[in-house]
Amino acid sequence: MKNRETEVNMEVKNETSIQEFILEAFPAVQHLGNLLFLVHLLAYLASIVGNMVIIIITWADHRLQTPMYVLLSTFSFCECCFITTVIPKLLSIFLSGRQTISFSACLTQAFFSFFLGAIIFFLMAVMSLDRYLAICKPLHYASIMNLKVSFLLISLCYSLSFILITCLVLKVSQLLFCGPNIISHFFCDLIALIHLSCSDTRSVEICLFFVTSFVILLSLIVTIIAYSNIVITVLRLPSAKERQKAFSTCSSHLIVLSLMYGSCVFIYLKPKQGNRLDSNREAALVNTVVTPLLNPVIYTLRNKQVHQALMDTLSRVRW
């Protein structure tokens, strides 16, 4: 009887022996560590500075304290937090070659990256609705969308994301990991973590597929409906100049939306994930490096109102 208990205890100990993981990052270009460090550092700093500019001028200039810019500044804040969750660890891998990450740190990174990512998708849907109301229902916009409603919608995005991702990460944390411990990614992606587990992962995979599908598809459907109505409204504008200006703005937004939704649909909306982890790694770079860099330029820094607010803020600081 004692021997049997000892065997069971040894099995449990072996199954839970993984204390840290190794982030494989990009093994094919490992010899370019210093160059990759510099490229990603510059992209990271540019993204942080661009998004911080949006946040600062929104709250420094009362003219920009409208629902549209409050949503944009919240979006920028989440982008800053999201890339800060992922990129610094990747930079340390490129610079020092240290690829290990503890089990608790890995789960923490996975939680915040998915939590912030979900908020970003919900915010994109809310921002699309805001633009739909402003362009398609201009007479009713002020009565429907105000600062109180925008803060309520932001709180809803945070709350819903927190509930969904907390439940998902808790399920992943209950899995057993008995080796190997090499994650084929540059951060602790839940797909890669689940793939390493020696437990029965079917229920967790279903939960992951449901949560990611709900977040991505719900926000995508709302965005498609909103922009479809915007396009129809713009086509009805009598002035060719107005149509061109509206389409110029919309096309810029749609480029970012296409990049984000396209990469995430490719990564997460597949029932079977194990065979395509390497391609997921490359696709994830779009959301962690490319779109955070483009967002400040496309969403606000091309906007004349933002330019004026920025110039006024700089002149006040100078004096």
Image (cartoon, rainbow, N blue to C red):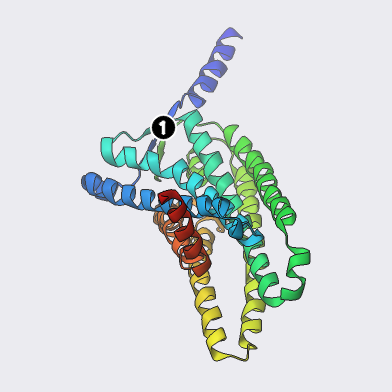
Work out whether residue 262 can be spotted. no
- Please indicate whether residue 215 sits to the left or right of residue 302 in the image: right
Residue at 73% from the left image edge and 62% from the top image edge: 145
Find residue 64 and report its horizontal and vertical position in percent: 59, 59
Residue type indicated by callout 1 = Ile
In the image, residue 23 sits, relative to residue 5, either above or below, namely below
Which residue is nearer to you in this view: 179 or 86?
A: 86
Residue at 66% from the left image edge and 56% from the top image edge: 214
Find residue 224 and report its horizontal and vertical position in percent: 63, 71
Find residue 95 and report its horizontal and vertical position in percent: 27, 39
Which residue is nearer to you in this view: 157 or 173?
A: 157
In the image, residue 132 sits, relative to residue 155, either above or below, namely below
Label 1 neighbourhood size at 10 Å, few (<14), some (14-19), many (20+)? some
Give the tally of numbered discs: 1
Kindly identify which residue carries mark 1.
101
Farthest-out residue, left: 31
Find residue 149 and report its horizontal and vertical position in percent: 74, 56
Q: Quadrant of the N terminus?
A: top right
- Please indicate whether residue 147 sits to the left or right of residue 65 in the image: right
- Please indicate whether residue 155 sits to the left or right of residue 181 in the image: right
Residue at 50% from the left image edge and 78% from the top image edge: 248
- Please indicate whether residue 304 sits to the left or right of residue 64 in the image: left
